Amino acid sequence: MMYPDAEFLVVGGGLAGALTVHQLRSADRQVVWIDRQFDHTATSTGAGIMNPITGRKFVYSWQFDRFFDRALEIYSILEKEPLPILHCLSIQKGLATPGDVNNWCLRLGTAPYDRYMREPELPTRYPFLNGCYQLGRIDPVFRVDMKQVVQAVCDKWGGPINGEMRSPRTAWINGQLLTMTNNQTVILATGAPIKDIQDVHLPLAPYQGQALLIHSAELPQDVIFHHKLKVVPYGNEIFWVGTFDRWDDRQEVPDAQGRQKLEDDLNAHFHISYTVIDHLSGIRPSSRTRRPFAGPLVGWENTYVINGLGTKGASLAPLVVDHLCRHLLSGEVIPEEFKQPTF
Ligand SMILES: Cc1cc2nc3c(=O)[nH]c(=O)nc-3n(C[C@H](O)[C@H](O)[C@H](O)COP(=O)(O)OP(=O)(O)OC[C@H]3O[C@@H](n4cnc5c(N)ncnc54)[C@H](O)[C@@H]3O)c2cc1C
């Protein structure tokens, strides 16, 4: 029998799986951690921006401050010099029309917007921007290096074993079939590919996002531009540029059409010289309710799921993982809003 002492099997080496392993191992519990080790995951692709103000109408992100406080806390704990996880930046949001400026100004001076949104300005400071009427600044905004979060957990507790979950209680590890006993707890933190696990049906609406990594010496290194595309500083004159989206999850790898569209949009809106150094893609694990969920997998004994982190995993994951782990470790009730949706 493989891993007879294991109390927990955590499946998934992305942000959700890594934070879950960290919480369980910090509580001195016996955990086996597996991942199918595929390059194109959401965690390895996403920019990790924790943005309090989102969408065309500049809406305050759902319960942002509640999630943000816990996120700052856990990422600060995991952060180790010289490899930072948290990067404090601001967003310059391109306001393309007078209507956008009006919508922006409607928010100014009211809580909680006044904490993050500043008066619009002319874009004269950034002459390389094309087609930008005015700029609205969101400040402060943090970028989370999600890959570094996973790395920090691996450094502290050891990385995941190469293995693939095929059904909610059985995995293939090194060519051997592992079946969990009834008293061993399985936690599925597999993001969008959960659909490939036999007999698991969740109300997900995942979609692919592609992004470029570019090198450019002509952009500031402390500002995220959101002008048609997001251009996000990664340090050392490297920038993440995204996204090109496909509204399904049939394709996991990046493709030529995505790269062309990203370069076309970048050339149209940013007059800069650059070289492309990588082309990324991942599937966002969005739920149909656009809310994250965590708790028992309906229909399965001793099997739990955390999913639905969607486009906001960096801010949502720490608190959702906390609730799941507190439930597993001390029986605390998971708040109703994180219950698995049933449609
Ligand atoms: C283009 C793009 C941009 C994004 N930008 C942002 C952003 O700016 N801010 C933000 O907060 N979020 C952003 N996100 C979303 C964020 O990346 C996700 O919410 C988060 O990474 C989800 O983490 P996860 O662990 O649930 O899933 P994943 O990162 O997908 O991890 C799941 C892991 O499980 C493994 N796995 C899957 N199936 C199996 C199996 N059967 N057996 C074993 N292992 C398995 C996979 O290999 C993977 O390692 C973005 C995502 C994309 C794609």
Image (cartoon, rainbow, N blue to C red):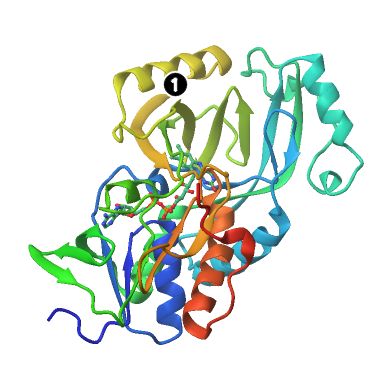
Disc 1 secondary structure class: helix
Residue 109 locus on image (x, y percent): 92, 41
Residue 200 locus on image (x, y percent): 33, 53
Q: Is residue 79 visible?
A: yes
**For residue 56, side relative to residue 29 (left or right):** right
- Residue at x 88% of width, y 37% of height: 108
Q: Is residue 288 above or below residue 125?
A: below
Q: Quadrant of residue 31?
A: bottom left
Q: Is residue 101 above or below residue 1?
A: above
Residue 71 locus on image (x, y percent): 60, 62
Question: Which sits in the foreground, 92 or 14?
Answer: 14
Category of crowding for the residue at label 1, using alpha-carbon neighbours closer than 10 angstroms: few (below 14), some (14–19), many (at least 20): many
Check disc 1 and report the residue beneath it. Answer: 262
**For residue 71, side relative to residue 151 (left or right):** right
Q: How many marks?
A: 1
Which quarter shows the N terminus? bottom left
Q: Is residue 72 visible?
A: no
Q: Quadrant of residue 332?
A: bottom right
Q: Is residue 182 above or below residue 254?
A: below
**For residue 215, side relative to residue 288 (left or right):** left
Q: Report the amino acid beneath label 1.
A: Leu
Q: Quadrant of residue 10?
A: bottom left
**For residue 142, side relative to residue 80 (left or right):** right
- Residue at x 27% of width, y 82% of height: 6
Residue pushed farthest left? 175
Question: Which sits in the foreground, 299 or 109?
Answer: 299
- Residue at x 57% of width, y 56% of height: 316
Residue 260 locus on image (x, y percent): 38, 16
